[in-house]
Image (cartoon, helix red, strand yellow):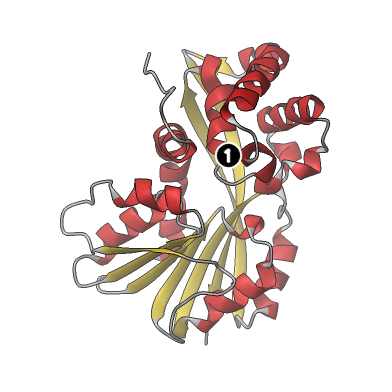
């Protein structure tokens, strides 16, 4: 078994959640984006760059990809990963989605995978996405559906809330924008002239079920404040306590050495006329 004791939260996220969740969902998002050669793409809340790298391969060397994230550690990990052959160069930038340091009408496509729900000012971020798009440009944005539709994560957050003496609502930011109509209205209010939302489900397979709590909690420290505030010792004690609580639950999702369960997302395709 790989020793991950020295890995940072950003490295754990990229190693464990990147190939199992981010990469498969990136293919879904890019399917809706229908990228073309030489297009200019902005990836907002890029994290370690799953969307940016796959987009760079699709637009090719004549295209342009800018990856923006507020977390410098995530960008540092992503920028060290290899790009596919013939891919566009990626410009990695630390920045706030609500105040993009980009010129008006400078991108053909804006992508945002599982980022919008984390932004403090979602409306400002949506307006910024609209501002940087050219006429007839498009944005593709994915957000998770409700926590109730993800029972394994619901059990994880409930156990964590008990251990921290917190509310589940303090922890479930990933699932905090579940309603497709709310998502659509947010984008229409930001100035997009045509918005379509589409539900999508993928079954994911996470390796090492016995380490799900440890690795998911460590990865969550990149984006969930209640986790990020814990020091290493406190996080280790929390993981051990949650693991005891969730042992029976995770067994129910185990299959041939993997945790196997569906994840549900709403994907918005928003266009500028």
* Residue farthest left in this picture: 86
Q: Residue at x 37, y 70 (%)?
A: 41
Instruction: Tell me the SS state at disc 1.
Output: loop
Report if residue 229 is visible in the image.
yes
* Total labels drawn: 1
Q: In the image, is residue 127 above or below residue 61?
A: below
Q: Could you tell whether 98 is left or right of 11 in the image?
A: right
Q: Position of residue 246 (x, y in %)?
A: 69, 17
Position of residue 92 relative to residue 176, above or below, is: below
At 36% across and 45% down in the image, what residue appears?
A: 77
Badge 1 density bin: few <14, some 14–19, many ≥20, Cα 10 Å: many
Foreground residue among 172 and 28: 172
- Tag 1 residue: 221
Residue 224, position in %: x, y?
A: 64, 44
Which residue is more in the foreground, 263 or 9?
9
**Residue 222 at x, y percent in the picture:** 54, 44
Residue 36 visible in the displayed image: no
Q: Quadrant of the N terminus?
A: top left
Q: Nearer the viewer, residue 232 or 211?
A: 232
Would you place residue 233 above or below residue 14 in this image? above
Q: Dividing the picture into quarters, in which one does residue 164 lie?
A: top right
Q: Where residue 86 sits: x, y (%)?
A: 16, 59
């Amino acid at each position: 078994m790989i020793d991950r004791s020295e890995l940072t939260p950003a490295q754990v996220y990229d190693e464990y959640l990147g190939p199992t969740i981010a990469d498969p969902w990136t293919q879904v998002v890019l399917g809706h984006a229908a990228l073309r050669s030489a297009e200019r793409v902005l990836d907002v809340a890029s994290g370690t760059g799953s969307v940016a790298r796959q987009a760079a391969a699709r637009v090719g060397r004549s295209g342009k990809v800018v990856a923006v994230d507020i977390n410098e550690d995530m960008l540092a990990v992503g920028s060290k990963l290899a790009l596919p052959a013939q891919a566009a160069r990626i410009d990695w930038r630390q920045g706030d989605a609500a105040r993009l340091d980009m010129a008006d009408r400078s991108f053909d496509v804006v992508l945002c995978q599982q980022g919008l729900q984390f932004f403090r000012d979602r409306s400002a971020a949506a307006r910024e996405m609209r501002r940087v798009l050219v006429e007839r440009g498009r944005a593709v944005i994915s957000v998770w559906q409700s926590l109730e539709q993800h029972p394994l994560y619901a059990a994880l957050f409930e156990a964590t809330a008990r251990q921290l003496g917190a509310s589940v609502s303090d922890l479930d930011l990933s699932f905090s924008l579940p309603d497709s109509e709310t998502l659509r209205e947010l984008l229409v209010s930001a100035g997009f002239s045509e918005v379509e939302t589409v539900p999508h489900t993928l079954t994911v397979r996470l390796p090492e079920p016995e380490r799900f709590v440890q690795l998911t909690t460590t990865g969550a420290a990149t984006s969930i404040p209640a986790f990020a505030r814990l020091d290493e010792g406190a996080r280790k004690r929390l993981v051990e306590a949650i693991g005891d609580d969730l042992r029976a639950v995770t067994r129910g999702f185990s299959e041939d050495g993997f945790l196997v369960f569906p994840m549900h997302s709403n994907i918005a395709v928003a266009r500028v006329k």
